[in-house]
Amino acid sequence: MSAIAVLTTFLFTVIKYNMALLYGTVGEIVTEKSGSLNLGVEGTMAIGGIGGLLVGCAFDNIFVGILASFICASLCGLLFAFLTVTLHANQNVTGLTITTFGLGLYFFIGNGFKASGKWPDMLSTEGFKRGTESLKIPLLNKIPVIGQALFSHSILIYLGIIISVLVWWYFKYTKPGLRIRAIGENPASADAVGVNITLYKYIHLMLGSGIMGIGGLLMAVNLSGSFEGSKCWINGYGWISIALVIFANWNTVAAIVGTLVFGLFNTLQVYGGSLSNAFPKLLGWLSKIPPQFMQALPFIITAIVLVVSSITNKKNNKPAAVGLNYYREDR
Amino acid sequence: MKKVLSLVLALALCFSLVACGGTGDNGTDEKFLVGAIYINGQNDTAGYTYAHHTGITKAMEQLGMDKSQLKIVDNVAEDDAAVTQAIDTLASQGCKLIIGISFGYINAMNDAAAKPQYKDIIFSHATGYLANDTNFNNYFGRIYQARYLAGIAAGMKSLALGNNNIGYVAAYGTEYAETCSGINGFALGVQSVNPNAKVYVSKINNWADEAKERQIAENLIDNYGCGVIAQHCDSAQPQIAAQEKNVFGCGYNSDMTAQASKAHLTAPIWNWDVYYKLAIETAMKTPKEFMTKVGVYYGGLKEGFVDVSPLTDNCVEGTKEVVAAVKDMMVKGEWDVFTNVKLSIDAEGKITKTEGAMLDNKGNEIISADGNTYYVYKDGAISAVEGGKDAQDGVIKGSMNYYVAGVEEING
């Protein structure tokens, strides 16, 4: 066992298995920037994951899979938008409904395919599997440790980073981005200057949900698309994403950092013992921490961040109108 | 519009009530009804609940019973109130045997069995440790025997690969006797053919977490150089990871060859239908003698309750014969895993027995050389278990909390 190899695989694992959180977080930020709180991330990711995997395997193409996961999940966003924007349903309840509905549909579809023997074997597909393999970035991947850990991932990992930077740019430097932020802060004034609130909300709720869906596909791919019936691939990551939104202070680039911090603690549960063996002087103490504490740690960190951010950061970036339905007649 | 809608809804409600009544009327009250409480959904296509559900339906089929004779309450959490409610539901439907498959149902089932109104109902609880003299038993199996056989297959593969490192992805380690005896049984099987092998155990600290199961398997392969990955966890992720990294593995619970055909050697499996057939038949025909005929059930290879899945072509040549020979010894009761007799199997498949004390990985004696004393750790110190030779099953089921020599736990 080489110490450098342990460190490299540790960092690699942090990124590979936690990047799905970034999709969930960025998707939820887009949603919240438009003034809606969608608690249905878990269900939306499940739908995106299973839809993307099934369609992607059927067409044997990763890009078709990504598109399909985006579309399937954005249909969940459409449902959410219809219920909350058009029918003015309570956003919290609707979000929870989307989660229940999404997970139910996930098991319904998965068990149906499995029982009829039609579940695709991702590992025996050609094009789709090739698309999920690691794409080594030339030159950069030659750097020791970092090269392997950061620059030899699958396309779905890089795409997550690209999307979060693009979304950051979109909100900060484009006109529609400015308008949607206005809607999130004060829909009445946005309405007064002539922004079509309903249209903007529909588009961004669907966009946000669609981004979440790609995260679901990433989780499916990480598990080689193996559907086992009793547990969902997403396994609570949707809920963690919602907490990460606050961690990242509604900034999609900060969400990358949040994802990595969370992923680091999450992966310590697996690698704590190996790291302490590899670096006995520096990290020997890791093996003495009880595993239960390790498991709780990411959530403790999130709780601490919530407390600290609510005490110190009075002017956080939370959109003022998030969670509130907009009634035009009440202006 | 509203009136029409409410009329339609009211009508729909009426019909739904009629439908409920209808099934009740059709039920014949003569038939013996089995009740089952599941932790997950009855329509699952894999996993723990699926295994039990398949076992019960298979047993009922063998007994010539109809599907309608099985009443199910599924997705019941390990919560006393929820379990009690499920029991009441099943009892009111007329079930005479109520099966609970999850460990956490233990208290609610124990309480229900003691209630006077349920004295004619037999309660049967998987994996638990409580029972009474009349109508409440528990059942589990000697899966460690099957793990020993899987260990032989893994050990022979490690010899052929020239790689003595073997990984074990475990839900828990010494915290539970179930996981602990499984790890030890497997390791002893490995050592019977490859005495130099080292079994690295890495824990998930969770009964089911697919992503972690996979990450742990990858860590064992990448950083500990393991050439065979065994597991005590629900999903096939460790096997899939093994296949992707071109090493081999032993699954668990079901034949995981379907998920990882190029890596899988064999898997220790449960034949739940063996117990369910015995339990249902006895409860149906001679309910009064249930506790004497079935009682606290702890079946093994002999009963066919546990076994290994068919050995795949990934196994080394000759594995089949050795596994069959050792299995035969256990079926006949000539030898068992946790005794003072150790098996050594040479390259020709010749089995030699040697007597001697069994040591744990700290060098302490856990079974004395004469086989008459069993030891476990109590408050950090090794201490003898009362009951001498007869303590064996109790230790394996309930108090084993050490790893045998040659096992190393990575985290924690």
Image (spheres, coloured by chain):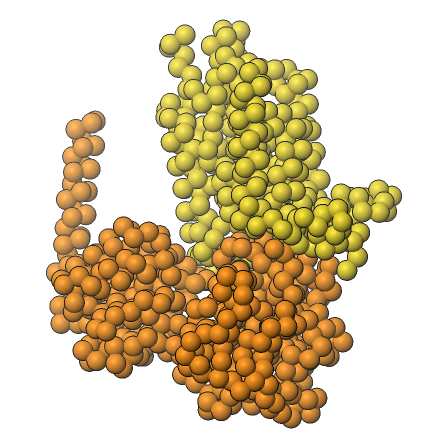
The residue at the point 48 percent across, 13 percent down is A187
Left or right relative to B162: residue A187: left
Percent x, y for residue A53?
A: 57, 50
Residue B232 to residue B394: above or below: above
Can the viewer see residue B228?
no
Residue B237 to residue A165: above or below: below
The residue at the point 60 percent across, 76 percent down is B359
Left or right relative to B61: residue B342: right
Report the number of discs. 0
Can the viewer see residue B196?
yes
- Give residue A86's quadrant in the image: top left
Seen from the viewer's position, the closer of residues B267 and A119 is: B267
Seen from the viewer's position, the closer of residues A5 and A38 is: A5
In the rendered image, the quadrant that contains the C terminus of chain B is: bottom right
The residue at the point 38 percent across, 31 percent down is A93
Residue B59 to residue A174: above or below: below
Percent x, y for residue A297?
A: 57, 41
Chain letter for the yellow colouring in the rendering: A
In the rendered image, the quadrant that contains the N terminus of chain B is: top left
The residue at the point 27 percent across, 82 percent down is B293
Percent x, y for residue A250?
A: 59, 24
Percent x, y for residue B234?
A: 50, 61
- Give residue A162's quadrant in the image: top right
Seen from the viewer's position, the closer of residues A191 and B389 is: B389
- Give residue A68's quadrant in the image: top right
Chain letter for the orange colouring in the rendering: B
Seen from the viewer's position, the closer of residues A256 and A220 is: A256
